[in-house]
Amino acid sequence: MFKKKNIDMTQGPIVGPMILFVLPMIGGSLCQLLYNTVDFIYVGNFVSSTAAAAVGASSSLITCLVGLFTGISVGVSVTIAQAIGAKDQERASDILHTGVAFGIIFGIVLMVVALFAARPILSLLNTPETVIDQAVLYMRIYMVGLPFNIVYNMSTGGMRAWGNSRTPFMILLVCGILNIVWDAIFVLVIPLGVAGVGIATVLSNVVSCFAALFFITRKNNFVTLSLRRLRINGSLLKKILYIGLPAGVQSIIITFSNIIVQYHINAFGETAVAAFSTYYKVENLIYIPIMAFGQASTTFSGQNVGAGQYRRLRKGTFMILGIGIVVTLIISGLILTFPNAVFSFFVKDQTVVDLALTLAMVSFPFYWIYVFLEGFGGSVRAMGYSLTSMIIIIANVCALRIALLRYLSVTYNTVRSLAFAYPITWATTSVCFFIAFIVIVSKKIRENDSLQ
């Protein structure tokens, strides 16, 4: 039933197909990272450090808003993967149409709200006066592309659910290259500064959205999207939101904790803001591949939940974690071996680079711990325990991290000390997810055994 470009994860070998599935996801995620990162590189190298700080100051808030619907797209992906595992193609189709329709409607609503709320929220975040006007401008322009970004994520979430990670990768590769070209045009040829890089990103989001819609409406997919069938099925939307809304809230909470970090960083002035933004860009080189392994864990687990194969789910999750840890150690090791060269690529101000390196030397050696958080978390959500996942994140990444930040800022009051909040909370969250995973999957295995 599966087409050649799709991967059935409910049978056969695990490692080989999983690597073939994950590699395009890592590539695609890195291409998507190019959108905002290239904006930062252009303004940091060809405009000013103030412009770089403006793009960076709005990044966490943008990630927060996008993260809500990215999380909901997880609900779409998981429910489709479960339907695919159960070989229920009609249900998978209905879920896809409901998810895309929901994304269109609420993507527009969220865009409008964000356009009006940009300045008040950035002011609340203690954004420096020298930066805030450009930060608001960049954010408002970026928000125009938000509905297109959301529809893209809903559409490609469906593709990944049936094992097709190559098409999203090709879309993002092309659009990432286009974004670089448009940034050059709107910064170097037509010197629009912060506005120029924002416009370039919006254009890239528009192209990626329509490209995803083009591919997902073709007849050779496991599930084909028909624009005439776009409508919201209430019962399916409830199922999507049951899994996806906690995942979206979880994404917001993680980003919110980063915003709290940024709030404390902002108190150290413009150089610190630019340094944290630079750190955040380099950090994404490690974080994005880990996210790909988390998405792989979600898709793999979702299909095997639908097929009722929980022992295979448990085995595959540990295999995914093993591969993810090796990849993370390689990437973080390379960055820590040539730190100055990597950070200087994003911004030329050596003072900014030195401060960013101070943050990285604290957290990067421990980033492999984050693989456990994403891998076990993705599997827990795929088994239908998205609320459990959200509670774990609230307790550790939100409550504990904020308490740590308060303690570290009062006790030590240095930029370096704030970075320790990251590895500590990664470790506590990973332990909680490990316990939840073992308890849930063991319960599911016992229940399946009792039915046989």
Image: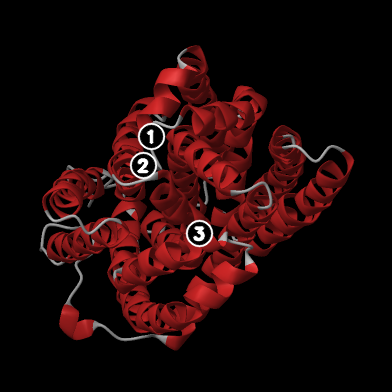
Q: Answer yes or no: do the residues labelled 1 and 3 have beta carbons within 8 Å?
A: no
Q: Quote the CA–CA distance across marks 2 and 3.
A: 15 Å
Instruction: Find numbered disc 2 in the image and state the secondary structure of the residue it sits on.
Output: helix
Farthest residue toward the top? 337
Residue at 13%, 51% (x, y): give it.
185
Q: Answer yes or no: do the residues labelled 2 and 1 have beta carbons within 8 Å?
A: yes
Q: Crowding near pointer 3: few (<14 within 10 Å), some, many (20+)?
A: some
Q: Is residue 358 toward the left or the right of residue 424 in the image?
A: left
Residue at 37%, 77% (x, y): give it.
107
Q: Is residue 30 toward the left or the right of residue 326 in the image?
A: left
Residue at image mark 2: 44
Residue at 45%, 14% (x, y): give it.
338
Name the amino acid type tagged 2.
Gly
* Rendering coords of residue 35 (x, y %): 30, 50
Residue at image mark 3: 130
- Observer able to see residue 40: yes
Instruction: Find numbered disc 1 in the image and state the secondary structure of the residue it sits on.
Output: helix
Quarter of the rendering containing residue 70: bottom left
